[in-house]
Amino acid sequence: MFHGYLPSPVTKSLVTLAIIAALGACSPTTEKPVINAQSSSNTFSPGAPGIDPTWAFAGKTGIGTSYVPYSDANNESESHSKVWFSIAQGVLTETMYGLIHNAQLKELQFIVTGNGFVDTEKQDTISTIDYLHKDELGRPLSLAYKVINTDKDGKYRIEKHIFTDPLHASLMMRVTFTAFEEGITPYLYVNPHMDNSGANDIADVVSQDGDLALIAYTNEAEPSVMTVKSDLPFIKASTGFVGVSDGLTDIKQDGEMNWQYRSTSDPQDQTIGNVALTAQLPGLEKSTDKEMKSLSFNLVLGFGNDPAQSMANADATLTRGYNQVLADYNGEGEAIGWQDYLASLTALPAMSGNTTDEGKLLYASALVLKAQEDKTHTGALIASLSNPWGDTVSAKVGSTGYKAVWPRDFYQCAMAFLAMGDTQTPKVAFEYLEKVQVTKHTPGYTGTPGWFLQKTHVDGEIEWVGVQLDQTAMPIMLGWKLWQAQIFSDAEITHWYQRMLKPAAEFLVTGGEVNLDWNHTHITPLKTQQERWEEQQGYSPSTAAAVISGLVAASDIARVAGDLKGAQRYLDTAKAMKQGLAERVITTKGLLSADGVAMTLADEQQTPPYYLRLSPQGKPNEARTLGDNNGRAGLDQRLILDGGFLELVRYGVVPADDAVIRQTLALMDNTQLDDNLRVKYTFTAKDGSLFPGFRRYGNDGYGEDTETGASYAEKGTNTPHQRGRVWPFFTGERGHYELALAIDNDSLTEKRHRELVDTYVQGMESFANQGLMLPEQVWDSVGDPSRYHYRHGQGTNSATPLAWTHAEYIKLVRSLTDKRVWDHYPVVDDKLKN
């Protein structure tokens, strides 16, 4: 990761010497590597630091990594791969090595030249994606992909098979070029972003046994190193600074590669920047009058903590070959791979019968969730293998984006693993949570312990420090679920109660002083410093649902642990919180009606009660203004709705047929509201039927600008016309509510069950892209879509795949399979009635 300092020129010299030594170790020759350069005058690339670096497009159509069983991950003597990759716009994008957030590559694509044209693969082709390994029903069995990019004018086709080597820190890509006219020449173009930054890179072209290899690293003391090699020799290669002296800039001038710089940095200086490596491949000529020549080769990205390791990993993967590496990745033969993990998920076969695509998205979701777990810090489940709106976000300084741990998203994923029949991952994940709980040992912290950090790196490094009470309740809820599933014995849950859950429950009861980094506050539950959208303080129905449920769960665990005083304390507090909730978050003097907005209601006028998204001071009948956020000016609290109140039903705090719940739903479903306040939108499913989608809340600004089409906070600045879009997992949340209502009303007939599957399960499936990735947000057709040519219901550039969306889909399918809500807590329902 980027540490923000530049070592002396000696460091660069040492890395260069290490590369030379590595090449010597791999080659029988003892001569200094020959650098392919035209002359000594162009040995080093000019134009540092290049244009400002950004990350890649965040709407991924595929992600991947090798499956590593916990027995291997916990044994450092075992060789296994810690490489993750993503695919977007038809090309390989952010690729990580070491820790799951430690990007080493922004993009790898091909430049193609021909008669009068210079194309880039990302911009000038039409892309399709599919899985290489599927069962007879078309369900993916591994995260190995086949990407086919066809020139828009039909001049050529590029087919790529992409996966990682389970035995080495390498990524393999089998590439097949097919030309449909003469004179086609492909070039490989690689834009490294080493150790999670695109601003401090160095690139070299070296020769090993006469074959050129591309190498990238930083000039920090202990950089990660990436080596790019092919089993088809490169004709020539060059390094350069992006936008100035890189290969793309060169080739665009006259359709030929004229520059052949050997390095972007002289060993005696500190020249770093946004670099790229370019390599020319053999041209494709016509072989007969009717057939065009195809060119196939294996390309490998090898990673390591030094040049020798990086080169050795690349060589080892090339030596093992395409067939063996892919077979091991899939889990064929004696190897343990992705198909073995899927086979271990005992609930999947029955669950597939409650989908409308024969389980395709279900299987993909299982793979996607497991892929988004770190391999060094096992159990660390991240939110998404993407940087939101990445292609407009600066990569000068390292950022985890969504490749980090939030206990809220974490809980959703752990519950989805449990729903699929995976008993190992949620247990390991729960145990990991101790790493991100605030204690007296948390660096720089003073105050009351027990709460869980807002956002951290997978190694526990603190990133964001807001206090969100639902993120402290959900680990307790997860522990209770694991105990009920007999994954934890009474003795084990007692251990975790004393070690982790009791301090969390105590914080939910008393709150206390918090002093960490910028955060100096006093927490008094149920009032939270930040609600589930991490933006504002106050009383939140969704936060309250988790806190009350967490305390009831803690009470149940405390009794088993022999802490009868604590058990009674937690239960009494939960009951008191529920009893006082209505006066904190339900307004009876509202500004919304089911057929429009009543802006002129007098304060004393009574209206049908409904839940607010948030009440800053717990006075829902007053004209209190919510805080400004995401470029949007705050509005009266009584104008803003979100679906968070449905968590009260899901967990068991409030029954599904509660009158205020149903009244609030009627307001949420009002499609006549102004688009700024409107929450519900309608989409078309695969079979032509309609289904609902929902925004986070009215007046949400976490999305693209409606007037300019600019990304959220593009160039680091919020704009007043930013607008949050529809989030697909709310379709799942609504489906869960409708199931709970049918159960409560004793109306879950086979017909109604089928309707729920066809509406909500199929609805979520319709939001998946061609690679079966589910997004954070989809385009709702409000504003200008021309920048990315969005279609209604298509995922935006916010973040895809979002783990929470895949988790909600899995849980919805499990709930409909069981005909009961998976996330429901019967103990909450039972204890709060008495």
Image (cartoon, rainbow, N blue to C red):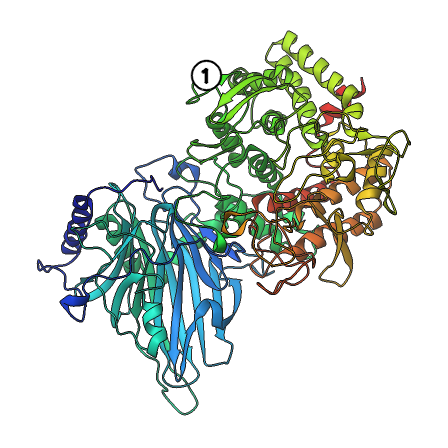
**Image quarter (top left, top right, bottom left or bottom right) of the C terminus:** top right
**Image quarter (top left, top right, bottom left or bottom right) of the N terminus:** top left
Looking at the rendering, which quadrant does residue 788 occupy?
bottom right
Q: Which residue is mark 1?
A: 440
The x, y position of residue 299, in whole percent, is: 34, 63
| Three-letter residue code for mark 1 | Lys
Element marked by disc 1: loop
The x, y position of residue 470, in whole percent, is: 63, 29
Q: Is residue 517 left or right of residue 802?
A: left
Crowd tier of the residue under label 1, counting other residues whose Cα lies within 10 Å: few below 14, some 14–19, many 20 or above? few
Image point (53%, 31%), residue name:
454
Taking 641 as reference, is 691 above or below it?
below
Q: Nearer the viewer, residue 511 or 549?
A: 511
Image point (60%, 40%), residue name:
416
Q: Is residue 714 left or right of residue 613?
A: left
Q: Residue furthest top?
A: 565
Taking 809 as reference, is 581 above or below it?
above
Q: Is residue 523 left or right of residue 747?
A: left
Q: Nearer the viewer, residue 830 or 239?
A: 239
Taking 254 as reference, is 412 above or below it?
above
Q: Residue furthest left?
A: 30
The x, y position of residue 555, in whole percent, is: 66, 16
Image point (74%, 63%), residue name:
687
- Can the viewer see residue 273? yes
